[in-house]
Every structure is written in C-alpha cells, then in structure tokens.
Image (cartoon, helix red, strand yellow):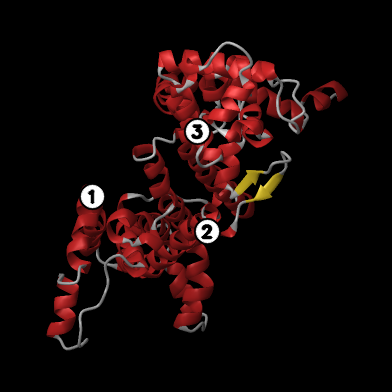
Amino acid sequence: MTRAASEFLTPQSLRTALRRADRPHRLRAFALALPAIAFLFITFGVPIGLFLLTSVGNPEVRETLPQTVAALADWDGKSVPPESAFAALAADLAVAKKQNTAASLGKRLNYESAGMRSRIMSITRKIDQLQPGPVAPQLTAADPAWGEPGIWRIIQRNGSKFTPYYLMTALDLRIDDNNGIAKVPDDQAVFIDILGRTMWISALVTFATLCLGFPTAYMISIAPARMAAIMTLLVLLPLWTSLLVRTTAWVVLLQTDGVINQALMAFHLTTEKLQLMLTRFGTVTAMTHIQLPFTILPILAVMKTIPPALMRAARSLGAPALSAFWRIYVPQTLPGVMAGCLMTFILSLGYYITPALVGGPRDQMLSNFIATYINRDLNWGMAAALALLLLVMTLSIYFIFLRLVGAERLKLG
C-alpha cells in the first residue's frame, strides 16, 4: 500500500466519509420529522416561552407612568424628587384615570409594598382636583407618603422593561431600600420550603413505587405468557382511566367514613377512625398508585431482555439463590430502575390535582401555588417565575442524572 493510500485510509478520513455518505439519510429523516417539530414548536415551545417571559416582564409602570419614569432617570434616590417628577406623576395619573389603567399599576406596585394600590387609586381619584401651581405640596398634602423617597424609589426601580422581582420572590429574596439583595423575613419565606416539600414528596413517591414496582415487574417477567399478559393488562389499566377519576376514587377510599376506615373497624384493627384524608400519607399513597405503571414498565422492559440462563449458570457454579439474584440479576435491571425512577420523580414534581384533592395545607406542591397565582390572584408574573423555577429544577435533575449515569444506560421501554 502506498503512503498516499495509507494517509487516505486514516480513521478520521473514514469517519468523515461515512458521515458524508450518511448525510442524505439524515436529511430525509429530518424532513420527515420537520412537520412534527414545527407543530411542537408552534403549539408548545412558543406559548411556554412567552409565558415564562412574563416572569421578568415589567410593563405596568413603564407604560402607565412614562413621564414619571423619564423624570426619575437622573434622580439620586436619596432625597425627595424635584417638582418635575411630581408634575410628571400628576400628568401620567390623569391619563391613567381616563384609560382605566391605574388599577393595574397599583396592583403591580402593591406586590413590592403593601398599600401601594390603595395609595395609587386614592391619588388618582383626586388628580382632577389639583390646582394650578406647584404639584408637590398638593400631592404630599393629600398623602404624606409622597413626600418620602421610599415610594419614589419603588417607581424608579420598576421603570425598566424587565424586573428580577418575581424570580427573586420565588427564591425568598427581595430588593432592599439600598437596591441590594436581601432575604425576606422568616414569616414571609415560603417558596424555598414549598420547593423542598415538592422534592421530598416526589422522592417518597419514587421510593414507594420502586418498592412496589420492582417485585411486580419481576413476577410478570417470570410468569407464564398467559398470566404475564393478564398482569401486564392490570398494570396498564389505570393509564386508561382519567387522572381525576383515579384521584376521586382515593378520596372515597381515604375519607373518614370511607372504605379503608370501615374495613379497619370491621376487622377490629383500629378502635377509632383514622384521619387519612388531607394528610401526607394520603397524598403519597394516591400519587404512588397513579405513578406505579410508569415505574413498572421500564423495569419490566429490561427484565424481559435478561436471559434466564444467567441465573441458572450462577446457581450451577455454586452461588446461593439470594446472592445470584443480587449480584447477577439486579445489576442488569439498573437501567430500567433508573429510567423508571427518573420518570416517576420528574412527573411527581408537577403534580397538581392529587395534592389539591387528597392533601392538606402542608401537602400542597409547587404546581398548586402556580395554579393559585393564575386562577385566583391573576399574578401571571409570579406564576411564571415559579413555573420557571420548577422547569430549571426538573432540567437540572435530568441533566445531573444523565451526567452521572449516561444517556445510553436509560431504557424507557
């Protein structure tokens, strides 16, 4: 072989040639998948992206008080603003009164300082009563708070297009009077605790489904074909039932006069009815039942690929049954175990209906608070911040898992 031929047949050149030859196949595959990708991007990616952008959006002050924001651009934030700022505020509030936008402005500023909404609405109602001349004395006479720098610092701080307020609040942080980052008071710090509670409940559900799902998957894998088909059908059957129906069924089972308490009393296992509803036990139990198929199926898929001859060979070589099971069989099921646990844990992080119906006040997860901010408080910025926090946490757990385990070891089916 000549030197030129040997250089041409280097591993790098072979890999390049193979990639070039495979390029048409990849392009055809991409073209076939392009409609699905475009559909997901338009119907899933874009709406979620726009929703998450509201976690840093800050349009209320900038759109309602444009002249005031401009007048406060060069203000030092320490002394009372000049007369031009008061005049600009009066002009902006006069326009806001005509356009009925003062309420949204007050609602936004009220997030950062309690009482701002009533203060904005009060001064807006009186804005037509201002007399010609300096505006500052008239505003401070109507409400002395306008003569203090603090209220103006809030307006100045929220004059930008974007704000870290929602994200910082989701992390139990705030901006102090010196524009520094500080922790919120202990009696107001709730979201980190809720985040920890969400992860803890998800971990409990994952552990419970693993303890129940592994033996079940093993029984199905060694059962005769007819029996295995029936058992697999029983595992899949809950997936064909509405999540709301399954959760409501657990409400019937766990309530004070429910089936479980009646059975315990009938068999004299307890002398009084137990409080099973609105408890952590009820929440974890119901979630475990719902998530169990998602843990069983990946484990079962891996178990069916393990040759039975391996266990027989280990026994023939003198290994005890339990030792052969733990040292030969179980390690081969780890890809399915890891995939099932990862799927269950991530799905449990986003649970909403089950904790809302079965759990108590101390069992509500992060998704429940996202729904509350959307449906009751109409605070889309805070809801988006909590959703972004949950998304970042979920992606972090997923990528850490892939980093430690490796994507090639996951077996989802």
Near-viewer residue (400 or 276): 276
Decide if residue 142 is on the left or right side of residue 271: right
**Circle 1 sits in a helix, a strand or a loop, which is it?**
helix
Tell me the number on the disc at residue 193.
2
In the rendered image, which quarter is residue 306 located in? bottom left
Neighbour tally class for label 1: few under 14, some 14-19, many 20 plus, Cα within 10 Å: few
* Quadrant the N terminus occupies: top right
**Circle 3 sits in a helix, a strand or a loop, which is it?**
helix
- What amino acid is labelled 1 in the image? Leu
Q: In the image, residue 311 lies at what x, y percent? A: 45, 72
Between label 2 and label 3, give the one nearer the viewer: 3
Near-viewer residue (95 or 332): 95
As drawn, 408 above or below 69: below
Separation of residues labelled 1 and 2 (CA atoms) = 27 Å
As drawn, 296 above or below 156: below
- What amino acid is labelled 3 in the image? Arg
Q: Residue at x 39, y 67 (%)?
A: 208
Q: Counting residues from the N terminus, which is met first, the one under dot 1 or under dot 2?
A: 2
Tell me the number on the disc at residue 119.
3
Residue furthest top as drawn: 132
Q: Residue at x 43, y 27 (%)?
A: 103
Q: In the image, residue 333 lies at what x, y percent? A: 47, 62
As drawn, 161 above or below 304: above
The residue singled out by tag 1 in the image is 244
Q: Residue at x 49, y 26 (%)?
A: 123
